[in-house]
Image: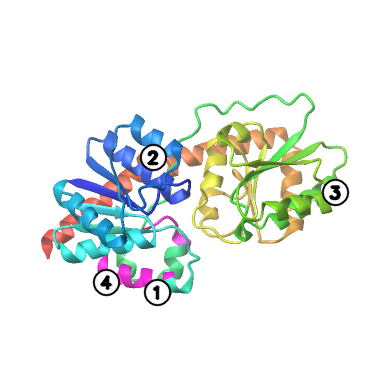
Amino acid sequence: MKIAVLCKTLQKGGAEKQALILTKLLSDKGIDVSLINWFGNKIDHRYLRFITDNSFRYFPLSGNYLKKFRTFGKTIRRNDVSIIVSYLTLPNFVSGLTRLLNKEILSIGGIRNEKLPYHKFIFEKLIHNRLNDATVFNNFSAKKKFVKLGFKSEKIHVIHNALAPAQNQEKDEKPDGEIRIITVGRFVKQKDYGTALKAFNTLLEQNNRIKFAYYIVGYGPLENKIRNLAQKLEINDKVKIFVNPPDIHGVLNKCDIFLSTSLFEGVSNSIMEAMAAGLPVVATNVGDNNYLVKDGFNGYLVPCRDTTKIVEKLEILARSQTLRKDFGKNSLTLIKREFSNEKMLENYLKLFSELAQNSRKL
């Protein structure tokens, strides 16, 4: 069995990170794997270092689309690839088209979000139903929605993202007793930072005996709007914004509670990173957040845009260090049990085996 993992880019992002994790897991297992980057010049320097450090067989493509497709096909043939795993719409199409031209290859697409523009949704539906052998969704919420809209259910396989627990979960000491709440996510409408900031403002007003700080970590087009709202609410002295820091875990390690106010999600990498850092979580009940956050076990689920509920749950955690520690330990337990690298690899190997067996029966 020889595998090729195809990405649109290797810039910083959830799909790209999972592609690198899968490549490493397969390589460490002794499986022959090639990593192919469609836009070969688009790669984060940290990902390039990761590829180099792990001695991956890496193929960055260049030229126009036709040249890239021809080079991709030659790479597949020369490396005797039997299974292609792709991430996102363009690679899914390239993988499926290659499958159409070579019946001996198995192609597995990847969809990472339940919210797609209409034209992408139609294209993904065609690719899934007609071209690829299977599509991996990283969340059950998207599977349920897409099946209702005409995706073939039997070709969808849900494999959650993987994240290894951080090596150090010791929290930095805060001599002033400050409770630090943190959100990690792109500065986009989906993350609903407006609700988060308004909830934090109410939290400050209702709890003047507790020292709070709100850390916001990310990057994106709404950065100025977030800063302006914090200033308008007169809480900018309590809000600290980190734009694309090199060590997100280092920032998580300084904090006490993770807050996610997203309006929609697939499976949230940022929540998983917070859990791996041993944090309790308050999150909106969207996407597969209910698989990550077990209400009353490692955090709380709240309705979207419900500042009252958000404040209520933040207050409960802020007032009990014991509860924060217990929930944080439970977050780690869930990550290790359900979202480990080993679990993800096991699920992919099972999928590879099933598809190979089915292809031999045809």
Of the residues tagged 4 and 3, which is closer to the observer?
Answer: 3
Work out whether mark 1 precedes mark 3 in sequence or the reverse, and give the earlier one.
1
What residue is shown at x 72% (from left), y 57% (from top)?
Answer: 194
What residue is shown at x 33% (from left), y 53% (from top)?
Answer: 38
Question: At numbered mark 4, what does the secondary structure look like: helix, strand or loop?
Answer: helix
What residue is shown at x 61% (from left), y 36% (from top)?
Answer: 252
Task: Give the label on residue 122, or none.
Answer: 1
Of the residues tagged 2 and 3, which is closer to the observer?
Answer: 3
Which residue matches tag 3?
234
On the image, which quarter does residue 44 sit in? top left
Work out whether mark 2 precedes mark 3 in sequence or the reverse, and give the earlier one.
3
Question: At numbered mark 2, what does the secondary structure look like: helix, strand or loop?
Answer: helix
Q: Is any part of residue 156 visible from this angle?
A: no
Amino acid type at image mark 1 = Ile
Which residue matches tag 2?
341
Q: Which residues are magenta?
A: 120-141
In the rendered view, would you say 51 is above or below 297? above
Task: Determine the main secondary structure of the stretch shown in magenta.
Answer: helix
Amino acid type at image mark 3 = Glu
Number of residues whose C-alpha sits closer than 10 Å to that of mark 4, classed few (under 14), some (14–19) or many (20 or more)? few
Question: At numbered mark 3, what does the secondary structure look like: helix, strand or loop?
Answer: loop
Q: Position of residue 121 (x, y in %)?
A: 42, 71
Number of residues whose C-alpha sits closer than 10 Å to that of mark 3, classed few (under 14), some (14–19) or many (20 or more)? few
33 vs 244, nearest the viewer: 244
Of the residues tagged 2 and 1, which is closer to the observer?
Answer: 1
Real-space Cα distance between discs 1 and 4? Answer: 12 Å
